[in-house]
Image (cartoon, helix red, strand yellow):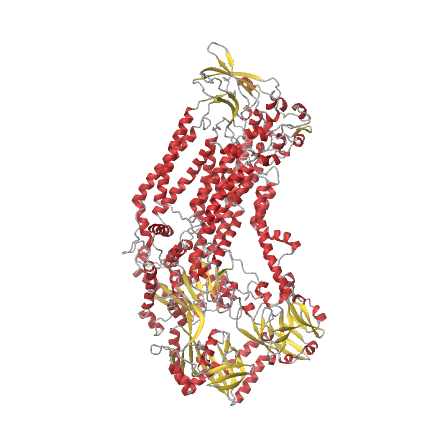
Amino acid sequence: MMASSYSAKDEDGHITVSGPGGGTLRNKKPENTAFKQQRLPAWQPILTAGTVLPAFFIIGLIFIPIGIGLYVTSNNIKEFEIDYTGDDTSSPCYNCAKNFSWNNTKSCTCTIPFQLDQPYESNVFMYYGLSNFYQNHRRYVKSRDDSQLNGNIDSLKKPSKECEPYASIDNKPIAPCGAIANSMFNDTLTLFYNDPNGTSVPIPLTSTGIAWWTDKHVKFRNPVGTNSNLTAVFQGTVKPVNWHRPVYELDTDPENNGFINEDFIVWMRTAALPTFRKLYRIIQKKNTMAPTLPRGNYTLVVDYNYPVRSFEGRKRMILSTISWMGGKNPFLGIAYITVGSVCFFLGVVLLVIHHKYGNRNNSANISN
Amino acid sequence: MTHLVCCVSAEEERRVRANDREYNEKFQYASNCIMTSKYNIITFLPVNLFEQFQEVANTYFLFLLILQLIPQISSLSWFTTIVPLALVLSITAVKDATDDYFRHKSDNQVNNRQSQVLIRGSLQNEKWMNVRVGDIIKLENNQFVAADLLLLSSTEPHGLCYIETAELDGETNMKVRQSVSVTSELGDPNNLASFDGEVVCEPPNNKLDRFSGTLYWREKKYSLTNQNMLLRGCVLRNTEACYGLVIFAGPDTKLMQNSGRTKFKRTSIDRLMNTLVLWIFGFLVCMGMILAVGNAGWEKEVGSLFQSYLAWDTPVNNFLFSAFLSFWSYVIILNTVVPISLYVSVEVIRLGHSYFINWDQQMFCSQCNTAAEARTTTLNEELGQVEYIFSDKTGTLTQNIMTFNKCSINGQSYGKDTHNTCRLDFSPFNPLADPDFCFYDDKLLESVKVGDSCTHEFFRLLSLCHTVMSEEKSEGELVYKAQSPDEGALVTAARNFGFVFRSRTPGTITTTEMGRTVTYSLLAILDFNNIRKRMSVIVRNPEGRIRLYCKGADTVLLERLHPCNQEVMSITSDHLNEYAADGLRTLALAYRDLSEDEWEAWSESHRFADKATDCREDRLAAAYEEVEQNMMLLGATAIEDKLQEGVPETIAILSLANIKIWVLTGDKQETAVNIGYSCKMLTDDMTEVFIISGHTVQSVRQELRRARERMIELSRGSGGGVGKQLHGSPLPPPLPLSNLMDNISGEFALVINGHSLAHALEADMEAEFVSTACACKAVICCRVTPLQKAQVVELIKKRKKAVTLAIGDGANDISMIKSAHIGVGISGQEGIQAVLASDYSFSQFRFLQRLLLVHGRWSYLRMCRFLCYFFYKNFAFTMVHFWFGFFCGFSAQTVYDQYFITLFNIVYTSLPVLAMGIFDQDVPDHRSLEYPKLYEPGQLNLLFNKREFFICIAQGIYTSVVLFFVPYAVLSNATQSNGVPLADYQTFAVTTATALVIVVSVQVVLDTGFWTVFNHVFVWGSLGSYFIIMFALHSQTLFRIFPNQFHFVGSAQSTLLQPVVWLTIALATAICIVPVLAFRFLKLDLKPQLSDTVRYTQLVRQKRRKPPEGRLGARGGSRRSGYAFAHQEGFGELITSGKNMRLSSLALASFASRHSSSWIDTLRRKKHTHTPPSGRQMTLKSIF
């Protein structure tokens, strides 16, 4: 085997060797550039005690105060939670939960009294929370048609395949289609303040401003037909199976009806985890003097429409104030304090190790 | 190619009739059209895709793609796989297409060359591709030969013509071809047109130096040999024109038959990588199973109850089926643990490293204008792991420039010694002398001048007995073209001493002897071959006396002398030993007078042997043997084979880098050993040099055993520690041999002869041989055949599982170069065969240190860092899905946006790690030459092995845990500052993805040790591109156009404006990075690697602004290779005394100290203990 890999090029006389009598006289010396000679100017960081140990201390010193700040802020936030699933026989909603049937058109109502020990200043946010509800299941997450929800007429009439098996009933398209929409939370929660003088005052709940701005204004749009009347636009579609009312009757306010109903939008923003809470209403602070929710007795009235017992789910109502960093979140503060302390501690340990063992080895090993 | 195969299998002999296309067409011989290209425009796409899908990885991704098209399984959109796959496929396709385009171009160019074909009596221009077997074509001077031709006639007398075969076998000297005498008379086209001879010959094969056939013409038979053939690829030189009959065309030509595909070499990292990828697949399947079981459980316990809100997909009717589908869904989303970009990135990095080798100025030889060349781009990192180097001697360690150095004439030795050191001037004595020739002994010139007959006969022999071609451009301006440089040196010597070879014809040799022109008639040339190891000519001088002149290896020649030569022979033998001890190449010269009758008789038997059709070569050899007897000894010549520049230094550094160097040479023992000494492979510091030269199995075995016993004994005696530790008991344990031999301390060397090697390589002794030889620092195998060279390499590959490198320059090294893991070709004097077979080529042996210690080390380091990071990154990326599985009902929901999954590996994180893989350096190049020990981690495979892999994987999994659970813990209860909960899926996805990108970027920042501008651009650019692309994908514009594709509208903005999200990301990053930082620091502080320390001292030095110390590289140039070693006595004394060579080791020491204080000393004194050498401490200040 002589010539091992033949290419016709070799036959042309372009041999790599410039022997006597052959070869080109072109200088083949590679260019002397920093790039080609791998001499590019470079920063060569090294982990030395001089850089690493201060880094640990600095991380520690930054994290601990942040942690403390977060923890204090979180502790100042007031949160009240009430579980109204109705699992327990003692629970006021036990009957509603037990007797639930999908065919019920009349909703079952239950009343739960509760007490706030502290006044809630500033705006108070009212959430409903669900547990063991898999909004993050793959089949659930994909079961929607964003095109339809964005007001596309074609998708309204012919929902995407992703919505199956909630795409149509008897060849009539479902609007909004899909499993997410179908399973929309439809309990109605109302709050009453039990005045010390015995009267029960309903607390005004704002139902707008609870969804993402982009969702409300970009992602969700009502279909625009020839008719400005929503009922006419949704003509020819049917409501999702589990719903009591069609989509165009979700609210009386035209700015909060149809696909742009904020309760609907909030529900459609699926949760990442099986236990989640969603913003339900906002209790606006009215006057500067009185707390939004003074301490005292309250009543939560639930129109119990949403069954969760079948899959061992839980339902909660949560009242919370918020700060710059959002709601109550003790974990973040504690985590920051822990990580900061660990860094600081590591810094000290490494410093000790370095002083006891580090130096000697470093100098001796060069000659090994 | 199929056509070719069918021809080879069908064709038993080839029949070609000249000027008879119809007859020849019956056989359907291949046409002269060559096709090295693989595709044409129509076939390109299908064929190329077919080829690409033969790659397992690509098929795997295709399989995934098909899985994704099943809606029940599809957990990812189709584009997450197809985009990377298409990218990879198209990059490869573009590369293949350009390659093929150039092949097409060169094929076309070659196929369309014009040649003159004799058709119907007249010469017509035809394209090469239209030339047919059986055509007669005319070639002119300096034209390429179009096909394999039978030479019919030429314009030169006797049908001679000259060709250059450099393209074919790489030999640059010219060769002579001669036509059969009957056809040489057919001078002009008219006669040739009526030529209707028929050639019957062997079928196409790839043997370049053999051809056998018969020409039938006018009822007569003429035998044809390779001497009558002009092969495609040769160039016609010094011949006005010639005519040839096409025998083999196109793919059947010997050139094309030799263009087999080279064996594809894989690196050990490649193999490891493949194993690891398989393991990862296993891991992937396991994860899939776990999650599928989880899915079954979930669907049974929860999912079935949850059906009112989430019904099963249509074909699913029970939880088991759902679990089965979920398995495949998870296989799809978890497939990114083995990203398709892995293989592409590895290729890109290797390509980059190859370019760096090609571009290296310090591996450029300005004398021969040759830069180093990485001929394969797939082996670079293996260069950082070499443990054994097998080197050829001639042309590799030595320059292969031969100088006539000494001679012994009739018992008198001439040559340079201590007395005469001035160079002789030949010009007044001989106007034809070569001015470049050097000789120092005027006694020899005197002896020529006074007309000593022996001296005259000596030089006459040198001027006659050779195969050199001469070219005399103008009067007295002679240029010799010799087959081997030895011959050239000898003829040049004779020329200077007054016996000038002027010209030759097939029948005569004309010389100028002492100013008088003499023409000898050349009766026969008994040519040289490896078995005969001698050549002879039989000439008749003008007076009519017939004499045979013979030169050859002393071993064969001294056996064939006339008994009366006893006395001269013994003196000459002494001289020969002396020369050999000096590392010179020796030849013995002899002559024999033949009477007219003897000549006649022999000539007859020779002719008979020559005509024989079977066993012709054996018969010829026997005939030669018959006449080369009873010769009279004239003397011996000694030729110096100069060492290449920087060889001793290179060998010293390589052996300090723990690389074992074996020299495999065809030279005789003494020469080889002395070259060993002169290039510092063997030193007098060595504890012992063992010589194995037994001729029988028993003696070889015994010698090996003795060597081993001695080694154990000596190492126990001197080194102490090892032996005692191992064998505390007083009884010497008989076994285990290998363990014992691994722990030999002390420096030993082994010299083994070719015939002993043959026994040592036998199956039952190879283990013994390997264990003995590998305990030695240096091994020299002398008188080995090319096949044995390859066998030795294979043996080490098989037994030691070590990375081997073979370096050589000649055709005899090809087998070794091909069988070693890495083959290096020296592009030197002996042509380019070795280079063509090699993986790397350069022109100086000393570049090897830079190739291994700098480029190899860097490549290995970079590749290892790349792989570690790459596996880490993908585990960190992918395993998040696994954890998420436990919270989403094992439904194969992804954590991230699909676009993020698509782009993560190819856009967001590919370039920083590529930049690291291409540009990273731990220590600068001159440091790695200064501290050869830095090479060791590669040999021990420390930087990337299964352990490192698991560490990377563990780190990746840890990161994925942090990346999932920190956002989980923080976000599950968190809300935006306007009260909207943060725990929605999209916010979670964006947070995790951003944290992931930041964490892996910080990790690559930590891993990168050498921040060039590219690293900065790529790292910051990738991070920037992540945010830009994310904002673009989450923008309203895209959503308005494709509302069903971009679900994440507004997420980026809404999420990244939240301080809690950034606090989460910072927290996750800190938790991921702090432990890594602490571990790295501890490792560095308590157990620093040599490279860390070197790096650190570099930093200290820079801070002190000391001027950099001189480079070690052997580029000074002023230092002549230490060839004039002192030992002049016989070989045995040399080893035992050891006095003479102290000078040489001193020279090395002083050389070293000149450069950097005394590292070489320290390293030379290296013991297997960790005691720091006294008297010398690097003064490193405390860090603070």
Furthest residue in direction bottom, as rendered: B543
Residue B1097 location (% of width, % of height): 34, 51
Query: In the figure, residue B731 lies in which quadrant?
Result: bottom left
Furthest residue in direction top, as rendered: A197
Q: Residue at x 43, y 17 (%)?
A: A117
* Image position of B942 with respect to A69: above or below: below
Quadrant location of the C terminus of chain A? bottom left
The residue lying toward the viewer, choosing from B659 and A265, is A265
* Image position of B743 with respect to B66: above or below: below
Q: How many marks?
A: 0
Q: Is residue B777 visible?
A: no
Residue B269 location (% of width, % of height): 48, 52
Residue B251 location (% of width, % of height): 63, 65
The residue lying toward the viewer, choosing from A185 and A65, is A65
Quadrant location of the N terminus of chain A? bottom right
* Image position of A100 with respect to B631: above or below: above
The residue lying toward the viewer, choosing from B618 and B188, is B188
Is B869 displayed left or right of B112 in the figure?
left
Q: Residue at x 57, y 42 (%)?
A: B80
Q: Is residue B41 visible?
A: yes
Residue B441 location (% of width, % of height): 38, 80
